[in-house]
């Protein structure tokens, strides 16, 4: 019997958990599904961690999340480097300062990470730390805030209507549906020989299978062309003056 292949999670995050009862109690973890993981920490479903199992500290809330990790091992590496708050208890500002330092490490800078804040006081502490340290935010880092109608991200998932906070995160591949459909249409209409990056025409992509071809346009755009990853690499290295780099750039336009 062949072993079942587990699907690659669409999302993997490292999160900062805080007790809503005692704000000095913090916990750092990683998960592909923040809403489900929060339920585990709060004892609503099986799982969780020993450090978050005390009823006197529940409910817990996720005040911030870092997303954009390429997989579980990457997120676990980031989580381990960040470390768990130890005694004497670290403040939220201390945890965020460590997070800021880690986000600037070269091995992590190359990842397209996003820092989400779900509580106003956590975002305020982040901005205060940046002002105090006079440090810049890594250029690759995207910062998003979603405080929702209330600050209670530990509240049950909204029923109907618009979701917010951790419940608004895309934990599956549904947001990529339009991209997949457009990519399929490109190859269905035998356009493998057409390739472009931005407004520049690249050499024909003959000889390349669909596995090494990607679309370069938004799914709702009129343009329907593909580009080899090698062509994109050359174009983006030129854009970022990385002609001698051994690895392709992390992003470009």
Image (cartoon, rainbow, N blue to C red):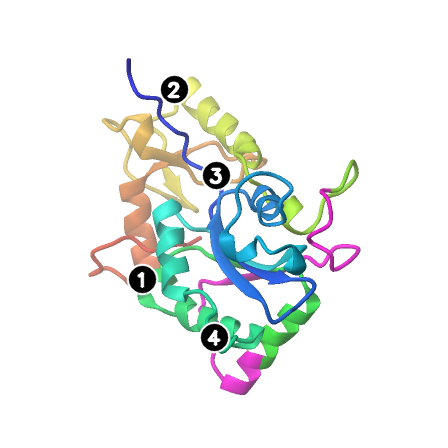
Q: Are marks 4 and 2 in contact (CB under 8 Å)?
A: no
Q: Earlier in the sequence, mark 4 or mark 1?
A: 4
Q: Is 9 part of what is drawn in magenta?
A: no
Binning the other alpha carbons within 10 Å of mark 4 as few (below 14), some (14 to 19) or many (20 upward) gives few
Above or below — where is 106 with respect to 94? above
Mark 4 element type: loop
Q: Is 143 part of what is drawn in magenta?
A: yes
> Majority secondary structure of the magenta segment?
loop
Give the residue displayed 66% in from the left and 68% down from the top.
22
Closer to the camera, 91 or 225? 91
Binning the other alpha carbons within 10 Å of mark 3 as few (below 14), some (14 to 19) or many (20 upward) gives some
Please identify, in this view, whether the residue under mark 1 or under mark 2 is nearer the observer: 1
Q: Earlier in the sequence, mark 4 or mark 2?
A: 4
Q: Which residues are magenta?
A: 129-157
Give the residue displayed 65% in from the left and 42% down from the top.
44
Please identify, in this view, whether the residue under mark 3 or under mark 2 is nearer the observer: 3
The residue identified by callout 3 is: 10
Binning the other alpha carbons within 10 Å of mark 2 as few (below 14), some (14 to 19) or many (20 upward) gives few
The residue identified by callout 1 is: 107
Label ID, residue 190: 2
Closer to the camera, 205 or 178? 178
Q: Are marks 4 and 1 in contact (CB under 8 Å)?
A: no
Q: Are marks 3 and 1 in contact (CB under 8 Å)?
A: no
Mark 3 element type: loop
Q: Give the Cα separation between the discs numbered 3 and 4.
A: 35 Å
Q: Give the Cα separation between the discs numbered 3 and 2.
A: 29 Å
Is residue 189 shown to the viewer in this render? no
């Amino acid at each position: 019997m062949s072993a079942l292949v587990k699907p690659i999670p669409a999302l993997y995050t490292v999160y900062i958990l805080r007790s809503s009862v005692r704000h000095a109690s913090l916990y750092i973890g990683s998960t592909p599904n923040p809403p489900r993981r929060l339920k585990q920490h709060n004892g609503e479903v099986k799982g969780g961690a020993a450090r978050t199992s005390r009823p006197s500290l529940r409910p817990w809330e996720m005040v911030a999340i870092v997303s954009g990790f390429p997989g579980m091992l990457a997120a676990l590496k980031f989580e381990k480097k960040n470390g768990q708050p130890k005694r004497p208890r670290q403040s939220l500002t201390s945890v965020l300062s460590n997070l800021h330092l880690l986000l600037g490490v070269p091995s992590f800078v190359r990842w397209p990470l996003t820092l989400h804040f779900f509580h106003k006081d956590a975002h305020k502490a982040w901005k205060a730390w940046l002002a105090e340290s006079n440090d810049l935010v890594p250029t690759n880092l995207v910062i998003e805030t979603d405080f929702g109608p209330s600050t209670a991200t530990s509240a049950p998932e909204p029923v109907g209507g618009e979701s917010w906070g951790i419940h608004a995160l895309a934990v599956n591949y549904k947001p990529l549906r339009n991209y997949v459909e457009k990519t399929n249409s490109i190859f269905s209409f035998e356009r493998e020989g057409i390739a472009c990056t931005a407004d520049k025409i690249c050499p024909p992509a003959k000889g390349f299978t669909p596995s090494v071809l990607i679309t370069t346009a938004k799914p709702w755009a009129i343009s329907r062309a593909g580009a080899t990853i090698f062509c994109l690499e050359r174009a983006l290295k030129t854009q970022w003056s990385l002609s001698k780099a051994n690895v392709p750039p992390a992003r470009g336009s």
